[in-house]
Image (cartoon, rainbow, N blue to C red):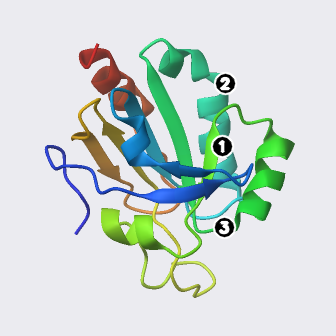
Amino acid sequence: MSIQAGAVAPQFSLFDTDKNKVSLADQKGKNVVVLFFPLAFTGVCTAELCNVRDNIALYNNTNAIVFGISVDSLFSLGKFRDEQKLNFRLLSDFNKEAASAYGVLYETFPAFDMLGVSKRAAFVIDKEGVVRYAEVCPTPGDLPNFEAIQQTLNSLN
C-alpha cells in the first residue's frame, strides 16, 4: 500500500543527474513535490515532466522543490533531463528503495513485463516532512492531478 496523506514521508537519499547525493532530510523547512515516474524517454513521462518544466514558476512561487524520481540510471536521467531541458532535479532510484518505501513499485510493469518499475505517483511533503498530498495514478498512462498538487502547495503557504 502506498503512503497516504498525513503520514511522515519516508526518507530517501538518491543521486541526481550531476552525481550529487540528495536526501529528503536535507529539505526540511521546504515544501517538496516528489514525482515518481516509470521510465525516461517515454511519451507520458515526457509529457508529465515537461508540464512541470513549463509551469516551474507555480512551484517556485509556493516555495516548493520538485524532484522527479525513476528507477532509470542517473546517466539515462541526465541525458533525458538535457534533451527535455528540465529545470528541476531528477533522482535515480536504481535500487528501487524510495519507490518501495513509498509503496509505488510495480511487481510487473503492465508494458513489456518489466520487473521493478515505479508507478506514476505524486506526493507533496510539507516543511516538517509530513505528506500532505498523495496520488498514485491508476495506470501508467494517467497523469497526476497538477491542479490538486498546486492547491495543496498553496494551502501550505
The residue at 31%/21% (across/down) is: 151
Q: Nearer the viewer, mark 1 or mark 2?
A: 2
Q: Which residue is mark 2?
A: 54
> Which amino acid is tagged 2?
Asp
Q: Which residue is mark 1?
A: 47
Q: Which residue is mark 3?
A: 72
Tell me, yes or no, if residue 137 can be seen here: yes
Q: Helix, strand, or loop for circle 1? A: helix
**Residue at image location 44% in from the left, 25% down from the top:** 64
Q: Quadrant of the C terminus?
A: top left
Q: Is residue 96 above or below residue 9?
A: below
Name the residue rendered at 24%, 17% in the picture: 155
Marks 3, 2: nearer the viewer: 3
Q: Is residue 84 left or right of residue 19?
A: right
Callout 1 amino acid? Ala
Residue 90 rendering spot, x and y as whole percentages: 63, 48
Residue 145 image offset from top left, x and y in percent: 40, 37
